[in-house]
Image (tube, rainbow, N blue to C red):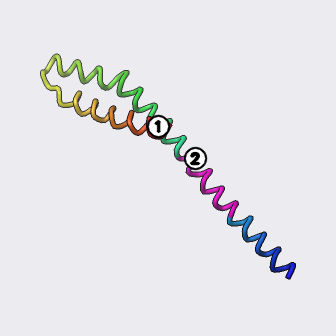
Amino acid sequence: MTTNINEKVKQYISEYNQKLQGLNQKLQDAKTRIQYLELEVRMLTEKEIPEASTIRVLEGDGSLEAKLKKTLAKYQQELQEKQ
């Protein structure tokens, strides 16, 4: 009987550790995604959108700027949801 209880406890601990490891992996993945989104938002706001605005002014084509602003809004929304 003691062996059966010991086995159940060992199994429970093993399952618990596996679930904990899975949660830690999900947390790390979320942190990595947040870092990626922060870098993308920074790149879009500091470099790509200003360049696209220049193209819009010089060439009259605002499609790239609109596309980048839409992407920026999507990234900002996802970043806000994850934080």
**Residue occupying the point 62% across, 50% down:** 24
Q: What secondary structure is the magenta-colored segment mainly? A: helix
Looking at the image, residue 3 lies above or below residue 30: below
| Mark carried by residue 36 | 1
Q: Helix, strand or loop at disc 1? A: helix
State the residue lying farthest toward the bottom: 1
Q: What percent of the width, then of the height, locates residue 67? A: 24, 33
Looking at the image, residue 54 lies above or below residue 14: above
Looking at the image, residue 23 lies above or below residue 60: below
- In terms of image quadrants, where is residue 62? top left
Alpha carbon separation for disc pair 1 and 2: 14 Å
Q: What percent of the width, then of the height, locates residue 52? A: 24, 24
Instruction: Look at mark 2 in the image and give the residue it sits on.
Output: 27
Q: Helix, strand or loop at disc 2? A: helix
**Residue occupying the point 44% across, 36% down:** 79
Magenta region: 16-29
Which mark sits nearer the N-terminus, 1 or 2?
2
Dot 2 amino acid type? Leu
78 in magenta: no
**Foreground: disc 1 or disc 2:** 2
Q: What percent of the width, then of the height, locates residue 60? A: 12, 21
Q: What percent of the width, then of the height, locates residue 76? A: 39, 33
